[in-house]
Image: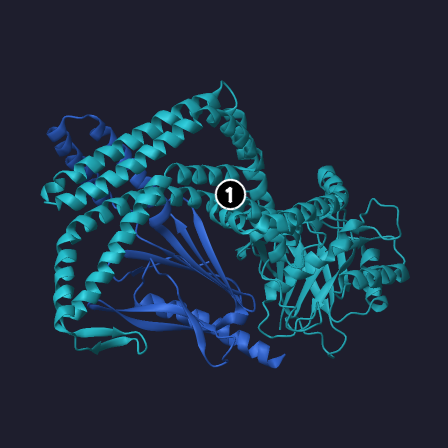
Chain colours: A cyan, B blue
Amino acid sequence: MVLKVFFPSCCSSADSGLLIGRWIPEQNSAIILAVVHFPFIPFQVKQYLSEVQKVSQIETVVLGTWCNNKQEKEESLGKFLDDLSTIFSHEPWLQISKEKGSKFWNCHTLSRQAGTPKEDQIILIYYDQRKTMLSRLHPPETSLDNQPGVITAPDASKLAAVFDTVARNEVLFLTDRYDEGPIKLSHWQSEGVEASIIVELAKQASVPVCMLLTCLLSLVSGLCRSRILKFWPLSFIWSKLSTCEQVGYRLEHLRFVFSNQKAENHTQFMRKANIFVSLLLDMALGIMLLSWLYRKNRIGQLAEALIPVADHVARELQDLLQWLMGVPAGLKMNRALDQVLGRFFLYHIHLWISYIHLLSPFIEMILWYVGLSACLGLTVVLSILSDIIALLTFHIYCFYVYGARLYCLKIYGLSSLWRLFRGKKWNVLRQRVDSCSYDLDQLFIGTLLFTILLFLLPTTALYYLVFTLLRLLVVFVQGLIHLLVDLIDSLPFYSIGLRLCRSYRLAAGVKFRVLEQEVGRPLRLLMQIP
Amino acid sequence: MEEPRNFSDIDGGHLALQRRCYSPSCREFCLSCPRLSLRSLTAATCSVWLAAYGLFALCQNSMVLSAAIFITLLGLLGYLHFVKIDQETLLIIGSLGIQMTSSYASGKESTTFIEMGKVKDVVINEAIYMQKVIYYLCILLKDPVEPQGVSQVVPVFQSAKPRLDCLIEVYRSCQEILAHQEVTSASS
């Protein structure tokens, strides 16, 4: 039977001692987590292991002995190590030893159950303990059964068990061989305990900050939901403005990130981290934009440029209408209808320009205050920009509505009169077309109206087409801006950054490399996280 | 360690198979694909540059020539890094799993590891590809829902495409290890 031993590469240079870790009998594999150095009292080791077991809920036991012969072979140490197997009984008992100057290790198992000790085939797999601890390789499904730490299903991934074991035993890595305690351990922290002051400070400060922010946010959202803002005209306006929607969406995000509960599982943690990084990026970009905008009187320049642009657009529209009123693209329009529609729209444009000119002295001030909202984030500024475009091209929207309504009425009229032409009628009760006998005068007037509407169709259709295309253009521009806003909102920047900088934390698989072999020694493999 | 043996792939190119036996339950098969031939490289470069020169003669803009050089260089680098596979390796470790590595001409390596618990069997399949019938070695994965079913078929040596004689060698060795592993897992 093949025995797999997972050995942390950081313990290769550790002094002799006891091996502690986890034994998985179903997979015949031993995962070594740390080495306990001499001198130790067996009773204290057992006590410590039971404490660790309580915290991590994984059976951590003494698996065997590790002998690092830095000097010449010591016979007495060998005898002592053999005696240890009687104190800490474990089946099978591992004995790993390393000679000075030799790359290849000796690995034996002692089995007391069978009469003859059969020599199992042993595979030694070295793994990087720190990277294995930090990566998340398909954690076993503990939601299916309520016993954490028990691998029940036979199809649970074997390697996931290794990763899970190392990740759960973080408490084991807190004590070190340099600590003043009864137990002296060697593991990946032995080269120097790795911790970051900033991370620790952030952890300490996070709880009161979260509480404060939660209170503030609940106040703000309570204000937003108050009854005053729910009356009919205001609620209609709020629903149409994309800025309000974006601000509401960001408030939701803030509440989710700064809520008082810790993330339950890894997916929620990643979601929180992604939203947090997205918020930070948003605000950073917004503040950069703010600092660029408020220098060298750019707001004033923008305000000055706005009125001529609006004038230019209005003039272009007037030219377009004049063209439609003449002979557009060689088509012959109905002169009377053409003139009526054209003059109606021209008057509309004239009204619109007057309003814009009325508003012109205030534009700079409005822009200045609106630009301050950039500190809330770039997405808010982009939503405001989209709203401003919508407001400035309101006349195009109106033209589109008029053109569409006229066209719609015409089509309804035409279809109804066409049915009359053929002697049929739309039955509203039965929701279908029925035959109907009309009187002669009904038929006469119906046919007359049908002819009139039919011959006026090209004119209306052309106006409808032109204004729909204009409206589509505006919608397209607004759509691009909204796409950018959605991109900033929902792109998982944290995951992307993690994959680029610390790719072992989002491991998708492992990679094995076969190290130098010697006949008669166990097979040596190196497990890497690409 | 054995010396490499010569086989050929389905297009007639030259392949070299090297078998390494690390332990009774661990074997590695290394297939080296034919290298990038100078003829095809020269042909591609010449055609691109002739086209660029033709365009230059038409529009008299020297940017076309520099653009052609740029495109050739980038294209070659991209081809070496993303397309041209130099060597394909299959490492089978009894009771751990099967690992497939492809190393590209630029040195990049892409690895896939499949655990032994998911592997149902290793078989040689036939495929009808346009007018040819080709053989390929593939790994069958177990279906977690249905114990007798196959959830996925993973082909091995996809860019080397060796012929049947080479595949039979690899197949025999893999079956030895899988059978040995079945025996030991049944006895435990």
Kindly give the residue lying farthest to the top in the view shown.
A296
Q: Residue at x 53, y 57 (%)?
A: A509
- Quick check: A125 left or right of B144? right
Q: Residue at x 29, y 41 (%)?
A: B75
Residue type at mark 1 is: Thr
Quick one: B188 or A111, which is closer to the camera? B188
* Whole-percent x, y for residue B188 in the image: 63, 79
Disc 1, SS: helix
B56 horizontally vs A125: left or right: left
The image position of residue A516, as x and y in percent, is 56, 53
* Picture residue at 53% right of the left edge, 47% below the top: A234
- Return the chain for callout 1: A
Q: Position of residue A244 (x, y in %)?
A: 53, 45
- The residue labelled by disc 1 is A243
Residue A299 appears in the figure: yes
Q: How many marks?
A: 1
The image shows residue B173, relative to residue A39, as above or below, that is below
In the rendered image, is residue A103 in sight?
no
Q: Report the front residue among A249 and B84.
A: A249
What residue do we see at 58% from left, 33% from top?
Answer: A375
Q: Quadrant of residue A77?
A: bottom right
Quick check: A273 left or right of A491?
right
Residue positioned most to the front: A441
- Between A444 and A47, the residue placed more toward the observer is A444
Residue A308, percent from left and from top? 35, 25
Residue A28 as seen in the image, left or right of residue A21? left
Packing grade of label 1 (10 A; few <14, some 14-19, many >=20) is many
**Which residue occupies the foreground of this view, A70 or B179?**
B179
